[in-house]
Amino acid sequence: MQNSYSVDIKKGLTNREVMVKKRLFGKNEIIEKKKVNPVSIFLNQYNNLISYMLFGSLLVSYILGEITDSLAILIIILINGIMGFIQEYRAEKSLDKLKELAAPTTRVLRDGEIKIIPAREVVPGDVVLLESGDRVPADGKILECESFLVDESLLTGESFPVEKSAFDLNTNNKGLKIHRKDMVFMGTLVISGRAKILITETGMNTEMGKIAHIIESIEDKKTPLQKKLEILGEKLIVICSLICVFVSLVGILRGESIANMFLFGVSLAVAAIPEGLPAIVTIVLAMGVQRMAKKNALIRRLPAVETLGCATVICSDKTGTLTENKMTVRKIYANNEMYIVTGTGYRLEGEIVRKDGSVFKNGDELKRLFEIAVSCNNAYLKEKETSNFLLNLMDYRKKELTVYGDSTEAALIIAGLKGGVSKEEIDEKYVRIKEIPFNSDRKRMSVMVKTRKGELLLFTKGAPEVVVNLCRYMDVEGKVIPLTFEDKERIMKVSEEMGGEALRVLAFAYKHVSLNEAKKGDLERDLIFSGLMGMIDPPRREVKEAIEKCFTAGIKPVMITGDHKSTAWAIAKEVGLLEKGGRIVTGEELDKITDKNLEEIIEDIAIYARVSPQHKLRIVKLLKKRGHVVAMTGDGVNDAPAIKEADIGISMGLSGTDVTKEASAMVLTDDNFRSIVNAVEEGRIIYENIKKFIRYLLSCNTGEVLTMIFSIILGLPLPLFPTQILLMNLVTDGLPAMALGIDPPVEDVMKKLPRRKKEDIFAGGLEKKIFVRGIKIGICTIISYIFGMYLSSGDLIYSRTLAYSTLIVSQLIFAFECRNDEKGITIKSLFTNIYLLFSVIISFGVFLLTIYVPNLQGIFHTVPLDFSVWIFIIAISAIGTII
């Protein structure tokens, strides 16, 4: 059992202790019963109608004594199986890697430092820090907690949240373990509050492990496109089978042997039916998802890849997505005076300058304000570790600090340090008694602290319009005076002006708390206003270009933020969001507008300011009602409904909660708006590439079938042998098709309007292009066949070699044409997809072996061709492309 530890709860485990426990207890994960089995994947390659037909033809050939043909068929069957196995195995491994990336993280205390680690790395004895929105990584005892509510419905089936309390040796905790109030369990969700947990059980020893329940983070369901292509494949099997039966019957009626025509019919069916189409789609989707992951967009559900290319609206948060999420306090308003704060980012360099130009030096005039800002705060700062000797010698004020916690709170700690008030000093002076946490409805946070003398104080920070209304007094240079209506108006005007400069404004207040008030709990009233702080989160430099790309691609970017209207407007103007016009609507205005009226103006709105998560959900629903395909970002627990409702739910990998990530289809590992646009572009590229290889495969297969039909119509002997058809299927349907699936994007992929979500894969005349190209391939092959009969005075082996060569060369040339059907083949296009170039060279090389290697000539019924004949073959094979 993992139930007795001697752990320093202030420092956590040491690295040495962690290593020992990892060896002893293993990883903190539920063991999956189903793992990727290479043998079953290989055998599954032959569990289909096509393979059964091939094995049947192999058996018939062997019984008839056609040992050479049967050996050739066996080799081709094995090669097909091996290629399919490699592709599918790689796809499975790709998805496994993505599951690793999608694994939840947690905050632990190790060696006295807070570290963010994958949840699977948690070991018994770890001290874990939890807050609202987190998934509990393993079972554990609650050491400390504040307003801690947990949703345990995953284990108990009870939908209401459970109030938890810290572990107490004097408390009787008998009964079922999962109902204990002083414990938390793996997989359950923190609804509100904060807690420090001592991990007691991990992995299969947890309650979750005992019921062997696992939530897969990447779904195995087929995408809509895969389902459509499977249906298409089934239809093609029926159609092609009927054609093959017809061709075989005609051959028999013309005097061909039944055995030969059976073998021929099976071979033609194998060549005609694109049995690998769904598999290639899966592989291309998986490879595309890997590319997206490298661009900081982690796809959790494959259907999202298809939907991304259809996106018409991207609704994005401002903080951290459009901006850098490195807040810096720029202005302070206190004592009826404005102070300017210099310095940027998470560095201590900078000063606080008064209106008269003098520098503030740790005076009492701002001390209470800084005490509130640093006390009412859950962030931590730590000096960045570096092995660079010169950087270690640098002035500590210039060093970059690492932030643990909210960026806004980090900025307040930096401002406090510039003003001479540190977190350590606050922890020494005050003991935190109670926290009333921030949420989007309250728009404020308060903490009750006790001084060393026993005096109780309440510190509050939050939105100015909320905090100022809770104030009855104001602090001016240490004197508490009544706060008049005129004072409130002046403060709010200053707040508006700061917001107009793209500053995020917070108000700070405090009060002395009596024991009676503390018992009643009604604390946040009759506060003393202390001051305002305005901070800026600068826009990301790359966002403006990404927004321009959105407009060019016919995608409407929309900012949705909880910040003030003027702050949102300033940032939107700087990143170019308002260049195409657009209006701003606040949450308060949304509450007064009916859905019908909002739907009428929603196309004109570019910014939603001061909105709640409930507003987000409403916006998504109305945009979808207008026919838009909506991508929506979010990070908080309350954002989950809007993210789930959106066509493409996007969660923040750095700042997002676990529950939001689980509700989303895509996770941004860098929280950057540009990564969303990159993912949309990649989604479009993937879809276009799927269309390319569908066009290639079906055109080639149509050409092969029409070649046989044309020969029957013209009364000619069949132009191909079964082994030639099978090899052709291997050469043309394999590597080139896969290479087209990873084709680099065309230049104008983000200059086109988004495709419709329900658009058929064959939209845009693809069916016609496939059929027309198939006719061209078939006609050119028949012409080559007839020309071969003319040159050889009716030698069928020579003529069939010519037809076989023409069919393969025309298909390999066509592979390059499929890259861009508008521009066709250019010198540049031959070298911009190196995979396609090499796949064509390899395929052509394999084909040449069947013509020029004597031992293979008998198997594939071929003869060597002269150089002059090759000029003819290449010329006639290229006619379709030239036309």
Image (tube, rainbow, N blue to C red):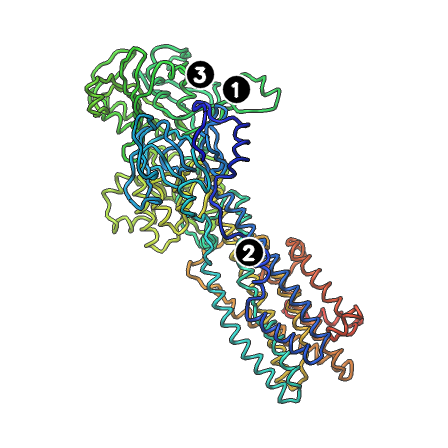
Going from N to C along the chain, the mark reached first, 1 or 3, is 3
Residue located beneath label 2 in the image: 284
**Quadrant of residue 690 in the image?**
bottom right
Vertical placement of residue 586 versus 527, above or below: below
Camera-nearest residue between 151 and 648: 151
**Quadrant of residue 824 in the image?**
bottom right
Front: mark 3 or 2:
2
Residue located beneath label 1 in the image: 398
Mark 3 Cα-neighbour bin, 10 Å: few <14, some 14–19, many ≥20: some
Camera-nearest residue between 866 and 389: 389
Pinpoint residue 876: horizontal percent, then vertical percent.
Answer: 69, 72
**Quadrant of residue 360 in the image?**
top left
Vertical placement of residue 643 versus 836, above or below: above
Residue located beneath label 3 in the image: 351
- Name the image quarter holding the N terminus: top left
The kind of residue on which mark 2 rests is Val
Going from N to C along the chain, the mark reached first, 3 or 2, is 2
Give the numbered dot on residue 221: none
Q: Residue at x 60, y 82 (%)?
A: 247
Vertical placement of residue 648 versus 484, above or below: below
Cα separation between marks 2 and 1:
47 Å
Cα separation between marks 3 and 2:
55 Å
Vertical placement of residue 322 versus 40, above or below: above
Q: Judging from the image, what secondary structure is the residue with disc 3 in?
A: loop
Camera-nearest residue between 593 and 62: 62
Cα separation between marks 1 and 3:
13 Å
The kind of residue on which mark 1 rests is Lys
Q: Residue at x 44, y 38 (%)?
A: 321
Does residue 439 appear in this view?
A: no
Pinpoint residue 287: horizontal percent, then vertical percent.
Answer: 56, 52
